[in-house]
Image (spheres, helix red, strand yellow):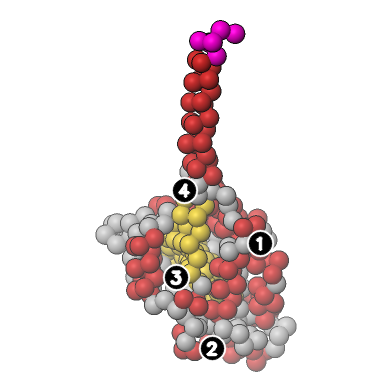
Amino acid sequence: MKITTKIIFGIVGGIGVIAGFMCLPNLFSRDYKVLIVAGHRTADNERGAISYYGKWENEFNDAIVNLFIDKKNQLAEVEYVLTPTTRDLSLQAKVKLAEDVKPDLYIEIHHDSGKQEDIDKAKADGIASPLWKSMSGFCILYYDDGDGKESKFPKESKKFAELLSEEMIKGNFHPDTYHARKQDMKLAGENKGICNRVKPKSLFVLRNAISPAIILECGYIINPIDEKVLSNPEIRKKIAQAINNAIVKFRKG
Ligand SMILES: [Zn+2]
């Protein structure tokens, strides 16, 4: 090989190596940001619902959010910004955090409860009461005000809610019907456990979201059977998996 040819190959090779290194950060960068927030706070009167066996809801919410700290529960291309209730953020602070983080997707985790009179009735009936079945299942809340004045991403939020519902159902979780039957919430289409939280039952964080946003109610912790299921670490991992699967599908559009 002539010296000039060697030089040309050397230059081309060098450019290739440099281009390769320039691409590396993009190849491995987490260019999609998901903010996952645990519902409620740590003060006794702000810890959310109390479970059948006497645990506070915020502990259940944190257990799901904290799963995403583990790299095994992360998608390689996603940057997870996690807010467990130990950060003790007010609703306003959660909205402010979302404005600062500018996520591509906002997910808030909750665990559900029913009306006190229904809980009391079921408790009086005993642990084997069929009444518990009426307060059971997951629910996904989004916000579409109908005219886009407040809800900035109603279509996208609903789309993510649908994808997450599909993944939850695939994971053997069943959709809730209690809120629509007993609490006048508006079910979106056929029952997939998806509710549009319109006024007067709209929610501050969904009204003020600056990205597609949903709230996942993982299940009813006031129900003794569901509480046991939702306390199981493997079941919790399945919920995290359903969230990740839905993120992957949502990104594909
Ligand atoms: Zn809650």
* Element marked by disc 2: helix
Residues at circles 4 and 3 in contact by the CB criterion of under 8 Å: no
| Magenta-drawn segment | 1-6
Q: How crowded is mark 2: few (under 14 residues within 10 Å), some or many (20 or more)?
A: few
* Element marked by disc 3: loop
Q: Which residue is pictured at 57% across the width and 58% down the height? A: 243
Q: Which residue is pictured at 53% across the width and 17% down the height? A: 9
Instruction: Report, in whole angstroms, how far the alpha carbon at label 1 lies from the one at label 2.
Output: 32 Å
Residues at circles 3 and 1 in contact by the CB criterion of under 8 Å: no
Instruction: Report, in whole angstroms, how far the alpha carbon at label 3 lies from the one at label 1.
Output: 27 Å
Q: Which residue is pictured at 39% across the width and 70% down the height? A: 94
* Element marked by disc 1: helix
The residue under label 2 is 117
**Residue 229 image position (x, y, % from top left):** 69, 73
The residue under label 1 is 238
- Nearest the viewer among 131 and 57 is 57
Q: Main secondary structure of the magenta part?
A: helix
Instruction: Report, in whole angstroms, how far the alpha carbon at label 1 lies from the one at label 4.
Output: 24 Å
Query: Which residue appears farthest toward the right when viewing the image?
Result: 128
Disc number placed over residue 31 in the picture, else none: 4
Of discs 4 and 3, which sits in the foreground? 4
Instruction: Report, in whole angstroms, how far the alpha carbon at label 4 lies from the one at label 2.
Output: 47 Å
The residue under label 3 is 185
Disc number placed over residue 191 in the picture, else none: none
Of discs 1 and 2, which sits in the foreground? 1
